[in-house]
């Protein structure tokens, strides 16, 4: 295969290791500067130029998109997708993972541990927000930042207020307020997900006096064997974000794993040094297994036929589907196909007719829009409080 590695740093450890791993497995690999492309958009012929020349055909792309070039980098990846080239991580997933607010909003729909987070726009909302988070200390985060940059621990409400006022002033930075998980201070877990499994994991421990555990900030890393709960959480978080390759950062909370971030371009040096595992080779193996399955916008493709669509249907105890099997639900008779059942952190693709549908499941279905609308749970309306007629209230 011919594989393109999108990277502005050909000498970086991760880029070099990926190129070596491709060549070790008999593939041709080329490191291509992400910013050297020209995107040509033409009817029926999406194409790319590199250094003013038409780009030759590639079988797969490994995006290593830096945070500072996310917009243009994801546009290049998107163009490869339109050309039918397999991309290890899709453009949409990279964009979502880079936005800390958006990514945690996406994760919040699912049954994963995440830190309580607030997005504040005005400084006068800081103090009430800190109270809702349980009081100081709190973590302040810039919406875009990597390797621990833009992450600040505020020990008091006044310090938090001053920091946010400074960042939102001339700097015009959007920030998040986040619950501080005391029991995991100065340490976290990085799980490296490739495909549908964790291939390597390490615990990162901050240097003395530092609460951020990033290796780039002087933290040390050690190999760790994840238990099933942490491994499932890492894989589920990566799948929710739509990433095939991801570094999932988790805190060790009293009630289990707490997902802090899902990184779409995780570095290889720390994880390979700490574990001795050939992570780059695992990424190349994934490409070999999936290169014939490039990214497809399922909703876009399946809704081209008028009257049909794709919908996620959550199942609760009161649903007509709860307790039935895929066959006995008679969804197929109503022109509805169950593509996947999401059951907590487990995805069940193409479920058999004998598969029971349980409360808490989320069904991904394709079928007639009228039928799907009838299956969707109706929004609950809040009851308005009855007002007592004037004159009937008792005097105090």
Image (cartoon, helix red, strand yellow):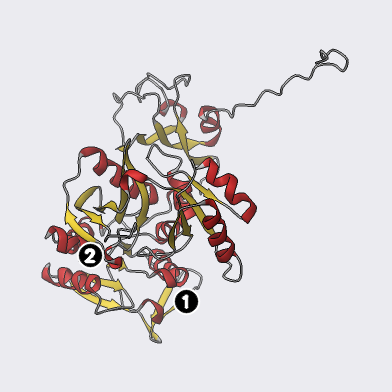
| Circle 1: element type | strand
Label 2 and label 1: CA atoms lie apart by 33 Å
| Residue on which the image places disc 1 | 40
Say which residue appears at 57% left-offset and 56% top-offset: 161
Location of residue 208 in the rendering, given as x and y in whole percent from the top left corner: 27, 60
| Circle 2: element type | loop
Is 221 drawn above or below residue 339 in the view shown? below
Residue 221 appears left or right of 69? left
Location of residue 253 in the rendering, given as x and y in whole percent from the top left corner: 32, 41
Quadrant location of the N terminus in the rendered image: bottom left
Mark in the foreground, 2 or 1: 2
Q: Quadrant of residue 276?
A: bottom left
Q: Are marks 2 and 1 in contact (CB under 8 Å)?
A: no
Determine crowd level at label 2: few under 14, some 14-19, many 20+ residues with C-alpha closer than 10 A.
Answer: some
Location of residue 17 in the rendering, given as x and y in whole percent from the top left corner: 18, 70
| Residue on which the image places disc 2 | 268
Location of residue 11 in the rendering, given as x and y in whole percent from the top left corner: 24, 79
């Amino acid at each position: 295969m011919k594989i393109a590695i999108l990277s502005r740093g050909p000498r970086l450890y991760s880029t070099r290791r990926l190129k070596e791993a491709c060549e070790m497995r008999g593939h041709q690999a080329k490191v291509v500067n992400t910013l050297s492309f020209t995107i040509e958009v033409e009817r029926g012929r999406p194409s790319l130029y590199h250094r003013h020349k038409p780009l030759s055909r590639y079988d797969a792309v490994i995006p290593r998109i830096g945070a500072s070039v996310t917009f243009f980098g994801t546009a290049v990846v998107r163009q490869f997708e339109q050309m039918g080239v397999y991309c290890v991580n899709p453009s949409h997933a990279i964009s979502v993972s880079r936005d800390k607010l958006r990514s945690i909003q996406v994760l919040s729909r699912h049954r994963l541990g995440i830190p309580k987070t607030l997005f504040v726009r005005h400084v006068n909302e800081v103090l009430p927000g800190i109270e809702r988070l349980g009081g100081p200390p709190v973590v302040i985060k810039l919406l875009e930042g990597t390797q621990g940059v833009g992450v600040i621990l505020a020990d008091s409400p006044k310090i938090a207020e001053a920091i946010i006022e400074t960042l939102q002033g001339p700097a015009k930075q959007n920030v998040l307020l986040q619950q501080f998980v005391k029991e995991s201070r100065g340490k976290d877990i990085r799980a490296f997900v490739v495909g549908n499994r964790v291939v390597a994991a390490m615990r990162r421990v901050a240097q003395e006096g530092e609460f951020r555990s990033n290796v780039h900030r002087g933290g040390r890393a050690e190999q760790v064997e994840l238990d099933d709960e942490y491994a499932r959480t890492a894989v589920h978080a990566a799948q929710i974000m739509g990433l095939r390759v991801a570094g999932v950062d988790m805190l060790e909370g009293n009630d289990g794993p707490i997902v802090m971030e899902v990184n779409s371009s995780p570095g290889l040096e720390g994880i390979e040094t700490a574990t001795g595992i050939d992570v780059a080779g695992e990424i190349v193996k994934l490409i070999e297994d999936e290169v014939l399955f490039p990214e497809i916008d399922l909703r876009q493709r399946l809704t081209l036929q008028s009257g049909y669509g794709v919908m996620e249907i959550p199942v609760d105890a009161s649903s007509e589907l709860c307790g039935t099997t895929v066959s006995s639900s008679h969804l197929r008779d109503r022109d509805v196909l169950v593509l996947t059942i999401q059951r907590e952190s487990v995805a069940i693709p193409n479920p058999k007719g004998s598969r029971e549908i349980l409360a808490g499941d989320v069904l991904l279905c394709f079928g007639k829009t009228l039928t799907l609308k009838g299956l969707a749970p109706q929004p609950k309306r809040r009851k308005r409080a009855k007002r007592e007629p004037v004159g009937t209230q008792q005097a105090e």
